[in-house]
Image (cartoon, grey):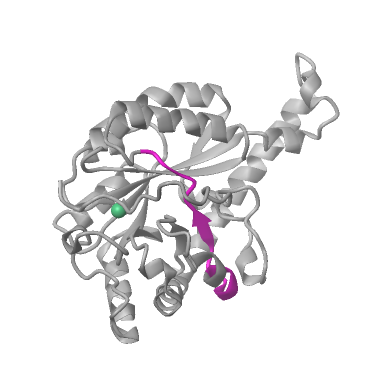
Amino acid sequence: MKKGWRWKKLLLKRNGIRLAAVGAAALFALNAWPAPSAANAGVPAEQVALKEHTVAVVIDDFGNRMKGTAEMLRLLIPITAAVMPFLPTSQADAEAAYAAGKEVIVHLPMEPVKGKPSWLGPRAILTGLSDEEIRLRTEAAIADVPHAVGMNNHMGSRATADERVMRIVLQVCKEHGLFFLDSRTSYKSVVPKLAREMGVPLLQNDLFLDDVYTDRHVGGQVLLLKARVQKQDRTVVIGHVGPPGLITSGQLAAAIPGLRRASVRFVKLSELLPPSAPYSLPGAELPGSASAELAPGSKLREDSPTSR
Ligand SMILES: [Zn+2]
């Protein structure tokens, strides 16, 4: 398949499912028993069907035999596995995730403002590199992670704020038909502006689940997610394999039934992309999703080290 059509094919597939769901909802409304609740009275069936809250759970840092890898892939929700390139199990983890029915994206190592170089992993995108080298590394990263349909940044608080660097990375994504998820490790990220200008489908992280590696903290973040889904239709959360991997997979497994009862539908990240490509239209915004800003001054997470 021509690479440029990957996300378009995904969208077609998803729209088919959505149309089927809307059709089913319309049929249900026609034959509804008991009568629709007062809250939904007079609301077209299509709008009732879209009342669901969709959540995409992205798990970062696959690729280096990280703690919690198997546990995350066993979760009974369609997680998106962000796999770091050029590491010992990059390909094996991407293949395992794909075989488990999960979505795969490239987790591109990018230069942070602070942090140990050893946390970045090999062939990271650094702001001191030439245009050509940035392009080569981004191309090689995509080639190293099989089944990838998108990309997000590992660390990258410095690189995602650099317009020259991000223009090249996003251009390569565009050429390969990949969408980009801004992990939002920097308030100065130029990714939203450039993605819109360049017509690259973009999603943004709403919430890191595991900045602190304790059950108490991750449990608290899950509670934040529960509150958040009541306020917005689409939410992107990021957790990690590695140091918090067992804690986060355990907390997610425990929370999934309750979230489903609260009308949360878990989806692959690509299912949150807009139905057409609004980012080809200057100024277009992604409706509802992951676009609320993090409060300035709140703690930004740079990401976790690539070692266990
Ligand atoms: Zn990462």
Q: Where is residue 276 in the image (x, y as percent from the top left)?
A: 63, 61
Write the residue at 15% across / 45% down. 308
Write the residue at 36% across / 67% down. 158
Query: Is 28 a magenta residue?
Result: no
Quick check: 229 above or below 235? above
> Picture quarter containing residue 222?
top left
Along the viewing direction, whichever of 140 and 134 lies nearer the viewer? 134
Quick check: 27 above or below 233? above
Q: Is residue 144 left or right of residue 261?
A: left
Query: Is 203 a magenta residue?
Result: yes
Q: What stretch is highlighted in magenta?
A: 195-209
> Picture quarter containing residue 233?
top right
**Residue 38 in view of the camera:** yes
**Residue 31 in view of the camera:** no
Quick check: 297 above or below 267? below
Write the residue at 65% across / 59% down. 285
- Residue located farthest toward the top when viewing the structure as drawn: 34
Along the viewing direction, whichever of 130 and 107 lies nearer the viewer? 130
Q: Where is residue 297 in the image (x, y as percent from the top left)?
A: 47, 50
Q: Is residue 130 left or right of residue 173?
A: left
Write the residue at 49% across / 32% down. 224
Q: Position of residue 274 (x, y in %)?
A: 61, 55
